[in-house]
Amino acid sequence: MTIVETTILPPCADSPEAYLDERLQTTSISTLNTAEREKLRAARAAVHRQCAGCPLLVECLYRAVVEVDVSGYAACTTEAERALIRERLGIEVVQSTLTPYGAPRVGGGPVSHEAVLTARQAYPKDTCQQLAERLGCSTSTVKRHLRRDREQRAAEAARPDPTAQQSLPTIDEVLDAFDSLESSQVA
Ligand code: SF4
């Protein structure tokens, strides 16, 4: 007898590159021309539709907002939108490499967060473009990793008591904050 196991994978597992596309994180829409805006709108709408139909959406959203500060598009939200939800909920993610999901995902390319920080340390006077050339990645990837590092350092410095337990929001509270996003209405 042959046992056939079927596993349903979420859409992001089928096309991870679409979710890690850095263009999706663009916040300065006003600087884009009409064609670029339309491309961005279409790209966001495509991943948004897939997440909206994903059976893991609620769990994924809760984890991406409350438990792990993942990079990329996830659960119908950009990184900026998840940060906004956290701000509205008054929480912040305590980053740890010991989460059940392992190290958080950083960046869309083959260049790791650590590689960018190591290169920055080794070549402190390099511009982002020069670092990108050394690493063989885009300038925006370098900027993004460096920005993330600055944000993490600032968050650590601003945290008054690292041992203090923050009360976690409920799933309903996260969903309410998500529903208040303008983009959550777009399917
Ligand atoms: S909701 Fe989460 S698990 Fe589902 S497709 Fe979107 S990112 Fe992937």
Image (spheres, helix red, strand yellow):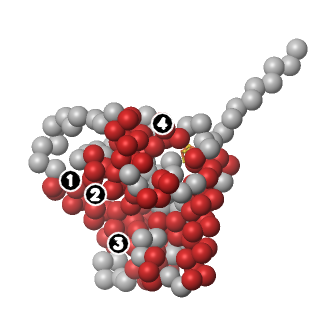
Vertical placement of residue 58 versus 127, above or below: above
User: The C terminus appears in which quarter of the rendering?
Assistant: bottom right
Q: How much space separates mark 2 and mark 3, taking CA atoms?
A: 16 Å
Q: How much space separates mark 3 and mark 1, taking CA atoms?
A: 20 Å
Q: Residue at x 61, y 82 (%)?
A: 35
The amino acid type of the residue labelled 3 equals Arg
Query: Are the residues tagged 1 and 2 within 8 Å (C-beta)?
Result: yes
Q: If you read the primary sequence from the N terminus, does the residue marked by circle 2 or circle 3 appear first? A: 3
What is the x, y in percent for residue 82? 39, 53
The amino acid type of the residue labelled 2 equals Gln
Secondary structure, mark 4, is helix
User: The N terminus appears in which quarter of the rendering?
Assistant: top right
Q: If you read the primary sequence from the N terminus, does the residue marked by circle 3 or circle 4 appear first? A: 4
Which disc number belongs to residue 90?
none
Which disc number belongs to residue 156?
1
Q: Quadrant of residue 45?
A: bottom right
Report which residue position mark 3 lands on.
120
Q: How much space separates mark 4 and mark 2, taking CA atoms?
A: 24 Å
The amino acid type of the residue labelled 4 equals Glu
What is the x, y in percent for residue 29? 46, 76
Report which residue position mark 2 lands on.
152
Regarding residue 114, the answer to whether it shows in the image is: no
